[in-house]
Amino acid sequence: MKPAPATKKPKKRGVRSRFRSIRFLLRICAYAIAIGVFWCAYLLYVINSYQAPKEIPQADAAIILGAALWSDKPSPGLRERLEHGFELYKQGKVEHFILSGGHDHNGSTLSEAEGMRDYLKAKGVPVEAMVLEEDSRSTYENLLFSKPLAYKRGWKHLLIVTHDFHSPRAADIAQYLGYPSDTLTVGFKSQVLSAAFNQSREVLAFTKWKLDELLLRMGVQLPNSF
């Protein structure tokens, strides 16, 4: 009489092992999603907690951060930044501008800085009052390249002009780059840009900046990608 065939217990163990591996991976994914949700919520809180300064002190110059040109003319968002900077000029808060922005490769023949200069010149700002920074292609480079232009002229008290959703990241980058502690980011609410879209985009941009900052602190030189 032949003995009954033995049950294949090792196969069951293999199935259980695979289930354990799947559960482990699912747990890791759940933790990663939870951390991502928390991080995004934190950044949205930071972005929405920004408060524009009630009193703006006099400064040596205002750095206006660039944005897109449309057919060599400032886009609606960039026009808002320029108008805000021009108001500071009219109020006597600043006498000089650093206009920061390179070529954005969207068909314009001018750099963002040149487009900004032409706009402010048409409003009566003398060319001598404006310094152009035309090499930057990111917020990080805006502030990195503008700093020596300011210091070369003895301008130490600076304002940074941009939208409110952009202000926390700009201020964080300025702090990393060693701008004076009294450097003030003058943000304002846009009347033409979508708040939901730009805040969502800013969460991604801020996240990328924090990762890039970590790499920079480790000594890694990064391409212009901020």
Image (cartoon, rainbow, N blue to C red):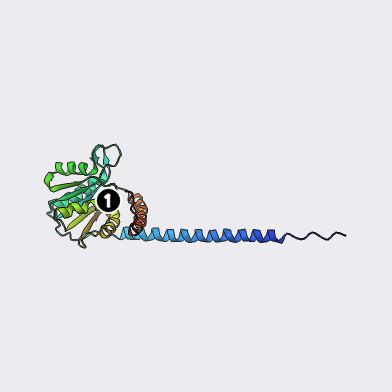
Could you tell me which residue is drawn at 40 percent across and 60 percent down? 39
Could you tell me which residue is drawn at 24 percent across and 43 percent down? 112
Number of marks drawn:
1
Q: How many other residues sit within 10 Å of disc 1, few (<14), some (14-19) or many (≥20)?
A: many
Residue designated by label 1:
141
Where residue 58 sits: x, y (%)? 14, 58
Q: Is residue 154 above or below residue 125?
A: below
Which is more toward the observer, 155 or 171? Answer: 155
Where residue 16 sits: x, y (%)? 64, 61
36 with respect to 219 (left or right): right
Which is more toward the observer, 83 or 201? Answer: 201
**The N terminus, quarter of image:** bottom right
Could you tell me which residue is drawn at 32 percent across and 58 percent down? 48
SS at circle 1: helix
**Residue type indicated by callout 1:** Glu
Could you tell me which residue is drawn at 26 percent across and 47 percent down? 136
Where residue 169 sits: x, y (%)? 30, 56
